[in-house]
Amino acid sequence: MKEVRWDDLIEKVSKVEKIVNEIKTIGGINVDWIEEKLERTKKDIYGKVFKISVFGGFSDGKSTIISFLLKRNDIEISPEPTTDKVNYYKYKNKNVVIADTPGLFSENLIHDEETKRFISESDLIIFVTDALNPLKESQHRVIKWLLKDLDKKDSTVFVINKIDTMDVDLYNREDFERACKIKKKVVSETLDRIIGENAGNYRIICVAADPWGMGIKYWMENIEEYFSISNMKVLEEIIEETIKSPETMNILFEKKVNSVIKDVKNVFSVELRNNLKSLEISLEELEVELEELDSELRKLEKHITKATRDFKERIRNLRSSILRRIKLCNNTEELGLVVREELGPEAVVLKSKIEDIFYECFTPVTEYLEKSGDIFLKIVEDYQKLKMESSIFASKFLTSATKKTGEILGKIPPDKLRDGILQTRDLLRIPFKFKPWGALKLARFLNTLGPVLGAVSLGMELYNQYKLRREKDNLIEAVDSLFSVFLGDFNSQYIKENYFSAVVEMENLRDAIYDDCKFMRERIENMKNLITKVEELGL
């Protein structure tokens, strides 16, 4: 077998790093741990560092085995799950390290996750299990992940520890082999059952890392006896043969990189698919809300447009009626009567008429808005809830995209929207004060109205027909100019902005939700492409 090209391995890891960066930016997933793992893997390749990891359940004897492999008695050994990080120890060759991992299968899930994340970057794995109850049910899921998903079968040595707790004479080699054969068979069959195939050919050995619990210090002082009964020499030989064989080292380094890639593939494929599903559900909910909101706004737009059209029609009729009466006046008495009945001092009569027409025309809009108010409120509340609860919305990649919507929602919390809808009817009752007519036009109108009213009070003797006709023309021009505001720029958009601001806010929200939906559709396509990239890793 030709030697591994280390640059090729580095290139493979670098390609994975690029995809991991996409997972972070597109998938909205925390990738800190895998970024650290990839960085460590590259350092291992550059330095040709060979990692041996020892792991298994708590109290199965991991630390004891490491102590004897390193010939050290200062490694902490505890029956309680106290180890919460990976500890590295040099093993003879400076480029070989043994890692004592946090124990698996404890109640502390952090320990479990820390250990699992480390396994894929290990070159040789020593899986320690108890002879009394080897490969407990709680360990099966992790073992399947190790052998099946990461394909670490050839990189794993199963060590059945505490064989001395069985009915066996450690000083009798035949008896030892007998007990060991029984346990190996149990472990091998269990492994086949776990991975769902008759793989066989597992590397399994039996040891008594601390015979009869005499302690490390005792056995360090009686090392020859220890090696004659513990079978630890076999484990040492497996390690030595592995690190001295360039061919084996090459295979294991390639497997390390492939395992890390599979780890990325297995972990993030699931997370991405979960996020994709969540995103698709969120989009579906948003589109339903958007359709309902858009439907209500279209109905409201029709009501407002019709009300505006009716208002302008009635204003046009009022204008025509007033102008017709002015034109028909034959003397100042008749003109005065028209002014008093149709206009009034300071135009109060005309104002009142226009305000009544406005209220009558737009009250149906208010009534419809009140009826549909519950729908609007539900949409706002549902959308706010969706943004609060959805893990996808909470993730970084959607923060900027939904900023506009958040600003709009901040302006129209449900209570404020509810008050706005309920106050619309009162708002329609607020006098115009002739604001839309413009101060200049109103001033001209009142300046025209004053002399006419004054002339009426003086009597006919001061007014000839010429002057009457001139005042009638001036009054007609002023009335015409005044009414032109309502017949020109006084449109449905102006009505919405000044009297139905809740509708304008809902239109803004609709547009923002539409932008969210568009962004999410793009994100879904990007995520689907990313999932394909991840699932094709290593092919």
Image (cartoon, grey):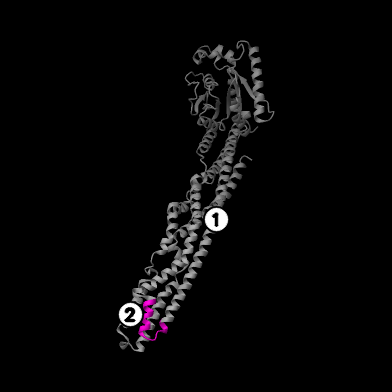
Residue 480 in the image, given as x and y percentages of width and height: 42, 78
The type of residue carrying mark 2 is: Leu
Of residue 484 and residue 355, the one placed in the foreground of this image is 355
Q: Residues within 10 Å of mark 1 (few under 14, many from 20)?
A: some
Magenta stretch containing residue 330, yes or no?
Answer: yes
Range covered by the magenta-colored residues: 326-341
The residue lying at 57 percent from left, 38 percent from top is: 267
Q: Secondary structure at mark 2?
A: helix
Tell me if residue 249 comes above or below residue 517 in the rendering: above
Q: Earlier in the sequence, mark 1 or mark 2?
A: 1
**Residue underneath mark 2:** 453
User: In the image, is 149 to the left or to the right of 97?
Assistant: right
Q: Secondary structure at mark 1?
A: helix
Of residue 309 and residue 259, the one placed in the foreground of this image is 309
Q: Quadrant of residue 490?
A: bottom left
**Residue underneath mark 1:** 292
The answer to whether one can see residue 397 in this image is no
